[in-house]
Amino acid sequence: MSVDVDELGLRERKRLATRRAIQLAALELVDEHGLDVTVEEISRRADVSPRTFFNYFASKEIALVGSGPTLPSGEARQRFVEAGPDEPLFVGIGRMMAETADVTTSDPEVFKLRRRLVKEHPRLAARRMETTHEFEQALAELVVERMLADDPTLADARAATEEKAWLVTMVSFGILRHAWKQWIDHSTSSMLRHYVLASFAEAKGLFG
């Protein structure tokens, strides 16, 4: 089931608000003064202590580029792996990614500013590429797990299965990028997850 930020508990909402404040402060300061801003300056702008900053982000660069999309864990992950061959693989990926979309990336203002600064600063672009690759690797491994659950005989051709999983992952990430672009460009009040589900549904209609 998808989760709206408004449906979260008070403690979780406060955590997300603090996380957003730190990210926005970091992005605004870099926009104003360049990359040489310090964690102390970011913490002061966000009205938190440096210790609190490091409770949320391991470094200034991670606060700036964000963690990117995340994969669900626990029951949500198991639902994807165990859905069975009756659920098309891309449908399952779209449903799974929609479950975490609004919790991890719910603020168009932060997203727009980050996107512009990543384009302007090669160092941030390089770090963003690292986080993207980490996500792609995790998704590819999960897709392999799902493919083997659907058809255990694929284990006999593990290398070929992994190659197919990487193709699925690359296509899926392209669909996610389309969803993010639609969400930003339309600047509506719709939750990001709606665009994720719509993009995956459109891709399914186009490519079968």
Image (tube, helix red, strand yellow):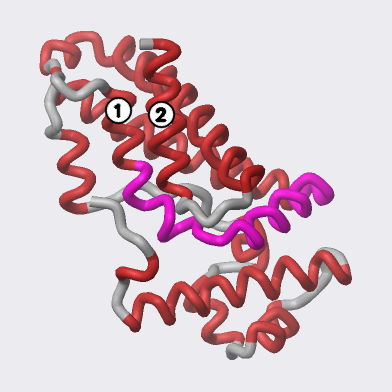
Q: Position of residue 92 (x, y in %)?
A: 27, 31
Whether residue 101 appears in magenta in the rendering, the answer is yes
Q: Report whether 127 appears left or right of 98.
A: right
Q: Report whether 9 appears left or right of 203.
A: left
Q: Report whether 37 appears left or right of 98.
A: right
Q: Position of residue 142 (x, y in %)?
A: 29, 34
SS state under label 2: helix
User: In this figure, which residue is indicated by the disc labeled 1?
Assistant: 91
Residues packed near mark 2 inside 10 Å, few (<14), some (14 to 19) or many (20 plus): many
User: Foreground: 191 or 62?
Assistant: 191
Q: Position of residue 166 (x, y in %)?
A: 42, 22
First in sequence: mark 1 or mark 2?
Answer: 1
Q: Are marks 1 and 2 in contact (CB under 8 Å)?
A: yes
Q: Is residue 12 above or below residue 149?
A: below
**Residue sitting at x 45%, y 53%:** 191
Examine the image and state in which quarter residue 90 appears: top left
Q: Report whether 70 appears left or right of 41.
A: left
Residues packed near mark 1 inside 10 Å, few (<14), some (14 to 19) or many (20 plus): some
User: In this figure, which residue is indicated by the disc labeled 2?
Assistant: 200
**Residue sitting at x 77%, y 54%:** 117
SS state under label 1: helix
**Residue sitting at x 30%, y 28%:** 91
Examine the image and state in which quarter residue 57 appears: bottom right
User: Foreground: 82 or 103?
Assistant: 103
**Residue sitting at x 42%, y 11%:** 207
First to last magenta residue range: 97-123
Q: Position of residue 204 (x, y in %)?
A: 38, 19
Identify which amino acid the numbered label 1 is placed on.
Val
Examine the image and state in which quarter residue 62 appears: bottom right
